Image (spheres, helix red, strand yellow):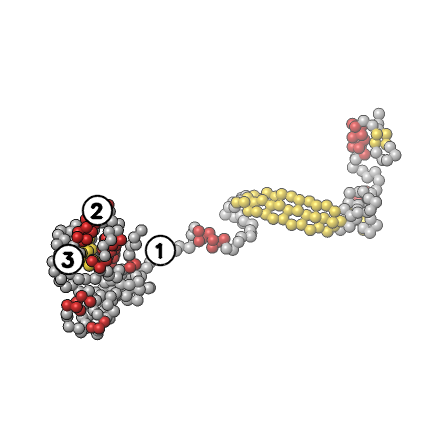
Amino acid sequence: MAPDCNSAGGFIGKRNDIQKAVRDALDGNYETAATVSQRRASVGSGDNQYQLRHTVFIGGGYEWRISKGFSLGLEAKYYQTGDDYLDGMTTNGNEKDNFLTGGINLGFNIGNANKKTEPKWFINPLNYLYNEANTPQHMKLPTPVLPDADGDGVTDQFDQEPNTPAGAAVDSHGVARDSDGDGVPDYKDKELLTPQRCFPVNADGVGTCPPTCCDSIAAGLISTRGKCNLGSMPSIQFTGKSISISTAAQTSLASVAQQLQANPDCKLNVTGHGASDKRAQQLSWDRTNAVIRYLVEKQGISENRFIFHYGTEGDPNTVDLEGTTEEGPNTAPAPNPQYQQHHK
């Protein structure tokens, strides 16, 4: 039994009967003409008549390059029509039919890799610089070369005296040291600490004052005052490039301190060795200074009881101690401070 059509234009009956009636109604032929806007132009006639209608749309999309052969894209479009007849139905308010579409696109680059052309992707122009800075692929950066023609530890571009003789003590600017400021560098100066009242000096750095006992003492030269009964003193051993005082050396220096305290008229020659190059000279100075600092700071011996010697010939891993009544400098400027080690 076929379903009945009610007054509202619908069907009444069993579900299967209603579905069959709807399929029969949608047989591909126009049963009735749809309502159209009179403002639209028509093309054709009869069943082949078409309405010309305009539609405005706006859309956009974005595509991501996942790899050299694969990409992912998203897009969306918004359409705005001029009437309410696109769906074949009208409403009381005659609202315009508008709709939105979207899509997801997958892109594949296939074919011969030598012939295909990859899409023109937007690339951050700074990416090349960042990638090259992190992992150079195209730019081959040469290994920096910092020449030091005179081997004084100060590169030529900063060396204000690029022809310093080998072994000469220099400052941080590569200029040969002049401890007494007499204009004669230490490596030529035969009177290393000339008093200023004896200036000017000759080509050997020797002043114009006649040598006297007092002048010799003021200049840091050696003079004899008497006997010292400290006896045989130990040698302090170092290893590698270290300037640390070992446990065994601390024990030896404690015994030396007791002897110095028992003999207040005695002084102590502290002599470091190493004259082969500037690093060796500085290491000799560092070790001599380490021994004196330990006796002063840990054993309480007055600093004026030491005579500072460094850079002499001998075992570079040894600092020798010797009792004396002579006078001499208890400190000296670091010969090559660019290589100086500091106590921790």
Task: Tell me: residue 70, above or below residue 200.
Answer: above
User: Type of residue at label 1?
Assistant: Thr
Q: Earlier in the sequence, mark 1 or mark 3?
A: 1
Query: Quick one: SS at disc 2?
Result: helix
Q: Nearer the viewer, residue 188 or 301?
A: 301
Q: What's the residue type where badge 2 is placed? A: Thr
Residue 227, by quadrant, is bottom left
Residue pointed to by mark 3: 324
Q: Furthest residue to the top?
A: 1
For residue 108, say whether it is visible.
yes
What SS does tag 1 mark? loop
Q: Position of residue 185 (x, y in %)?
A: 23, 67
Residue depicted at x 51% and y 46%: 113
Give the residue number, with chain letter if any, for mark 1: 143
Q: Which residue is mark 2?
A: 251
Total labels: the figure holds 3
Query: Residue type at mark 3?
Result: Thr
Is 234 placed above or below 17 here?
A: below
Kindly identify the residue that appears in the image at 13 percent across and 62 percent down.
225
In which quarter of the view is residue 288 placed? bottom left
Q: Secondary structure at mark 3?
A: strand
Residue 84 at x, y = what percent? 79, 46
The residue lying at 79 percent from left, 48 percent from top is 83
Quadrant location of the N terminus in the rendered image: top right
What is the x, y in percent for residue 314?
17, 54
